[in-house]
Image (cartoon, helix red, strand yellow):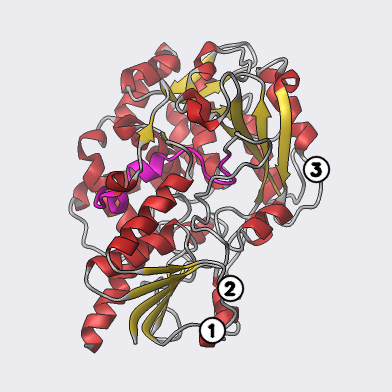
Amino acid sequence: MLDAVVVGAGPNGLTAAVELARRGFSVALFEARDTVGGGARTEELTLPGFRHDPCSAAHPLGINSPAFRALPLERYGLEWLHAELPMAHPFPDGSAAVLSRSVAETAASFGPRDAGAYRRLVEPFLPRWDTLARDFMSLPLTALPRDPVTLARFGLAGLPPSTWLTRRFRDEPAKTLFAGLVAHVMSPLSGLATGAIGLVFALAAHARGWPVARGGSQAISDALASYLKDLGGSVHTDYEVKRLDDLPPARAYVFDTSPTALARIAGFGNHYARFRYGAAAFKVDYALDGPVPWTAPEARVAGTVQIGADSAEIGAALRAASREGRAPERPFLITVQPGVADPTRAPAGKQVFWAYGHVPGGWTGDLTDAIERQLERFAPGFRDRVLARAIAGPAELAARNANYVGGDIATGAATGLQLLLRPKLSLFPYATPHPAVFICSAATPPGPGVHGMSGHNAAKAVWRRLRQAA
């Protein structure tokens, strides 16, 4: 009998399997797709030689993840590559605010009236960032805080809505860039703890940047899978699990799946009936005949570029998708241009590029034209560079990754208490009604992102149970 079976080979499932194998447990991992990866894959979606990341491409949480940093992933081929700027936020007049590795450079891009306020916001946390990240991403009850005072200060700043936090800024560049940071989790700006989301992304950039993985996000998943095999674990792809009986006998079962799928497979009935899925992504991957023709010079050297004219436009786009049930006319866009840091992603002189906007969950329309109109506002002539497109609305995203129910790439709405207490109001979020079954997906704390911490935290709960039962 195996000690543990893990279902789902996304970053969290892979990390959970690795953490258990590192501690001497026998582990088998099962994945329905033909390759491991989940939200960290790389495929030729458009033309031969153009390597795209179907979901996550830039990894501020990956390089800062306490789980990943404790593993020898570089020995298994993972190499982080950095653009000159982690992120830029251009404006219609050709200027831009930036999120730089340097706090001073970032603050200066906001203008003199907000530079000091930004420095006062982030500088107290940076010297303690590694401890703060570990404490913040390990909650709840997976580890005692190492620095409870700093964590409490962070909570005071981050628990209120981001609209409260940005009141300390007087001008639009700072307010707009920060609003864009919050929008990465598709949460309305007025939601609980949205200030913390913006702070985490900003601090991550200052600490270690927003890199891409050389060759594509698949490198992260492949490194985890290779390490797992060296530890004695087994990986089985093309293996769809429809019920627990499809799996070999084990002392524990760990699911990197949506709560909906887990309830169906394990026969939990309505246990997760109150779990809410949120707004969806509408994503377009591009093969380009050259770099994006951004008007703002800063955007040309940034790995990630946020698109929204001002904080009001970003807020309206989020409300439309999350609360009003409609697609925004001017969507807020998150775009990534991996070739700025990694020229191996496309043939010489060409580029891969992706952009996504927010739409209601399950939306069936086509946002492509609205996305490209937005891009043309900040990069005139963009359409002239397009060689090919791969379009993925909510249905296509859900088909690619079953965890993205209705196209929700966060595996559950990151709003209200569900941002903090996922997938149920419980102090033991990785446990389920069955004592031998656990959940480790992004539907559990600390939530969405390629960081493996949900898997790391769930693995702790599993090995404690296995040792108690030994």
Which residue: 47% across, 44% down? 217
Residue type at numbered disc 3: Asp
Disc with the residue nearer the chain's start (1 vs 2): 2
Nearer to the camera, 360 or 417: 360
Residue 401 appears in which quarter of the rendering? Answer: bottom right
Q: Which residue is mark 2?
A: 240
Disc with the residue nearer the chain's start (3 vs 2): 2
Q: Are marks 1 and 2 in contact (CB under 8 Å)?
A: yes
Which residue is situated farthest in the left direction here? 146
Residues at marks 3 and 1, CA–CA distance in whole angstroms: 38 Å
Taking the image as drawn, is residue 171 in sight?
Answer: no
Vertical arrangement, residue 7 with respect to residue 307, above or below: below
Q: Which mark is residue 366?
A: 3
Few, some or many C-alpha atoms within 10 Å of disc 1 (few <14, some 14-19, many ≥20)? few
Question: Is residue 69 magenta-colored?
Answer: yes
Nearer to the camera, 41 or 306: 41
Tag in front: 3 or 2? 2
Please name the predominant secondary structure of the magenta segment in the image.
loop
Residue type at numbered disc 1: Asp
Q: Which mark is residue 246?
A: 1
| Residue 114 position within the rendered picture, expressed as x and y whole percent measured from the top left | 41, 19
Few, some or many C-alpha atoms within 10 Å of disc 3 (few <14, some 14-19, many ≥20)? some
Few, some or many C-alpha atoms within 10 Å of disc 2 (few <14, some 14-19, many ≥20)? some
306 with respect to 438 (left or right): right
Residue type at numbered disc 2: Glu
Disc with the residue nearer the chain's start (3 vs 1): 1
* Quadrant assignment for the N terminus: bottom left
Which residue: 58% across, 32% down? 335
- Which residues are drawn in magenta? 52-72
What secondary structure is found at the residue carrying circle 3?
loop
